[in-house]
């Protein structure tokens, strides 16, 4: 007698990068600020942006958001 069976298996794997992102999002603002300051001190390749650079980035971001909203209306 012949017997046939089929089965399916579904699994999910969480990447370490996603776990790290979730941990960062769960941190209180003060703890996150301390971690950022420590990383800036330890890693010479990182540098803090000036207020002027931050304002420029916000303006560019606002422009991009406005352009996207205009495209959605079309």
Image (cartoon, rainbow, N blue to C red):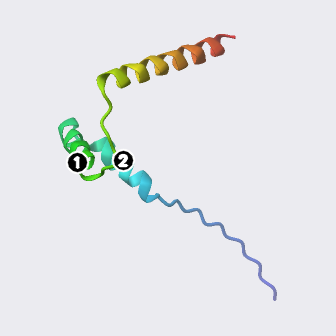
**Residue at 55% over, 62% down:** 11
User: Which residue is more in the foreground, 8 or 73?
Assistant: 73
User: Which residue is more in the foreground, 55 or 33?
Assistant: 55
Real-space CA distance between mark 2 and mark 1, rounded to the nearest whole angstrom: 24 Å
**Residue at 46% over, 58% down:** 14
**Residue at 61% over, 11% down:** 70
**Whole-percent x, y for residue 44 in the image:** 30, 50
**Residue at 38% over, 47% down:** 21
Disc number for residue 52: none
Q: Is residue 7 left or right of residue 38?
A: right
* Residue 48 lies in quadrant: top left
Q: Is residue 14 left or right of residue 54?
A: right
Q: Which residue is tagged 1?
A: 41
Answer above or below: position of 43 versus 9: above
Answer above or below: position of 71 versus 33: above
* Residue 3 lies in quadrant: bottom right
Q: Report the mark closest to the observer, 2 or 1.
A: 1
Q: Residue furthest bottom?
A: 1
Q: Residue furthest right?
A: 1
Quarter of the figure that contains the N terminus: bottom right
Q: At numbered mark 2, what does the secondary structure look like: helix, strand or loop?
A: helix
Quarter of the figure that contains the C terminus: top right
**Whole-percent x, y for residue 4 in the image:** 77, 78
Answer above or below: position of 44 versus 64: below
User: Which residue is more in the foreground, 44 or 24?
Assistant: 44
**Whole-percent x, y for residue 32 in the image:** 24, 41
Q: Badge 1: how crowded within 10 Å, few (<14), some, or many (20+)? A: few
Q: Which residue is tagged 2?
A: 22
* Residue 31 lies in quadrant: top left
**Whole-percent x, y for residue 30 in the image:** 18, 37
Q: Badge 2: how crowded within 10 Å, few (<14), some, or many (20+)? A: few
Q: At numbered mark 1, what does the secondary structure look like: helix, strand or loop?
A: helix
């Amino acid at each position: 007698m012949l017997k046939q069976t089929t089965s399916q298996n579904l699994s999910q794997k969480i990447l370490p990068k996603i776990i790290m992102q979730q941990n960062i999002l769960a941190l209180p603002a003060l703890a996150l600020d301390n971690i950022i300051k420590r990383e800036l001190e330890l890693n010479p390749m990182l540098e803090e942006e000036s207020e002027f650079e931050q304002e420029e980035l916000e303006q560019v971001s606002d422009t991009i958001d406005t352009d996207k909203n205009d495209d959605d209306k079309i």
